[in-house]
Amino acid sequence: MGESYSHPEVIVSTQWVFEHLHDPKVRVAEVDYDPAANYNQGHALGAVLFDWKKDMNDSLKRDILSKEQLEELFQRNGISNDTTLVLYGDFNNWFAAYAFWDLKYYKVDKVKLMDGGRKKWLLEDRPISKDIPSYPRAKFSVAGPDTAVRIYRDEVRAAVGKPDKVLVDVRGPKEFTGEITAPPEYPNEAAQRGGHIPGAKNIPWGMAVNDADGTFKPRQELEALYTAKGVTRDKGVITYCRIGERSSHSWFVLKYLLGYPDVKNYDGSWTEWGNSILYPVEK
């Protein structure tokens, strides 16, 4: 699958995962925003849980998980440097893509996304379980970070208006225009002001996937989606959303499926920019 993508090696089908459920060299992890509503109700057979709030973020400061947190997460789930890790999750892989981005920041090599995520696995009636799997503790060490995949607020501000840069706001149209500051299901993650970073192009993340099963659209459709808005591979691309999870999904599409050479995820996103004094906003 995905032969036309630039990096087909980072995406696998539900069938591939099904065939490797008992492969000792493969570990499957479900990444959820709300495990009680998803993982705990049944997950892919043998899959471990990566709780997005607890496992993929620092508990004390606004940041991704630390090097030490990542090493402990992998070790206790039996994931070594030789293990191939397959990520999937809820919300059509929003949070799985965020985890993928986290891991690429730390230069984790053997990691893939399951196309279609939890939605497709359930639609196909693949085997699920409520049992919590346990694996022997493994040895794992982190090599990163790779700063080329991440960008910070002041660097984003410096890029605004530059002809060789383009910002992609992957939120919904009402968030982009400032009519709302957060989707209704996330009322506590809003900003003081609504709108978007000046000059940003609005290409909602969901336009990259098929509605029926959450799988990624063919390369030709993805190319057309972004180039129509001036998001071309000769520019440095910056993706952002509200808290960095949806934008990591679009970052994955641009960097790995389309092979754009310079794509960075601004994980501070609108909850940082929209709360920053003297930072410009467009509506």
Image (cartoon, helix red, strand yellow):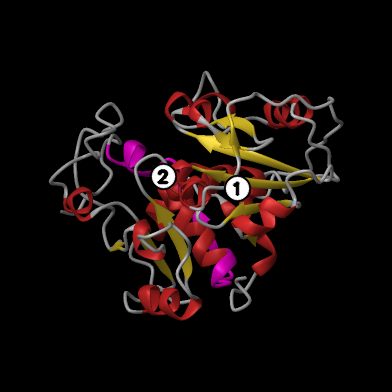
Q: Residue furthest top?
A: 60
Circle 2 Cα neighbour tier, 10 Å, few/some/many (<14 / 14–19 / ≥20): some
Compared with 50, 144 (above or below) is below
Kindly identify which residue carries mark 1. 100
Report whether 124 appears left or right of 283: right
Is residue 83 visible in the rendered image? The answer is yes
- The local secondary structure at tag 2 comes to helix
Q: Amino acid at mark 1?
A: Phe
Q: Amino acid at mark 2?
A: Phe
Kindly identify which residue carries mark 2. 91
- Residue at the (75%, 30%) spot, across then down: 71
- Residue at the (26%, 58%) spot, across then down: 198
- The local secondary structure at tag 1 comes to helix
Tell me how many marks there are.
Answer: 2
Residue 19 pos. (x, y %): 73, 54
| Alpha carbons under labels 2 and 1: distance apart | 15 Å
Q: Is residue 266 magenta?
A: yes
For the residues carrying marks 2 and 1, which lies nearer the camera in this image? 2
> Viewer-proximal residue, 267 or 154?
267
Residue 269 pos. (x, y %): 38, 44
Compared with 245, 139 (above or below) is above
Pointer 2 or 1: first along the chain? 2
> Viewer-proximal residue, 199 or 101?
101
Where, by quadrant of the figure, is residue 164 drawn?
A: bottom left
Q: Residue furthest left?
A: 179
The quadrant of the rendering that contains the N terminus is bottom right
The quadrant of the rendering that contains the C terminus is bottom left
| Extent of the magenta region | 256-274
Residue 58 pos. (x, y %): 56, 25
Compared with 92, 63 (above or below) is above
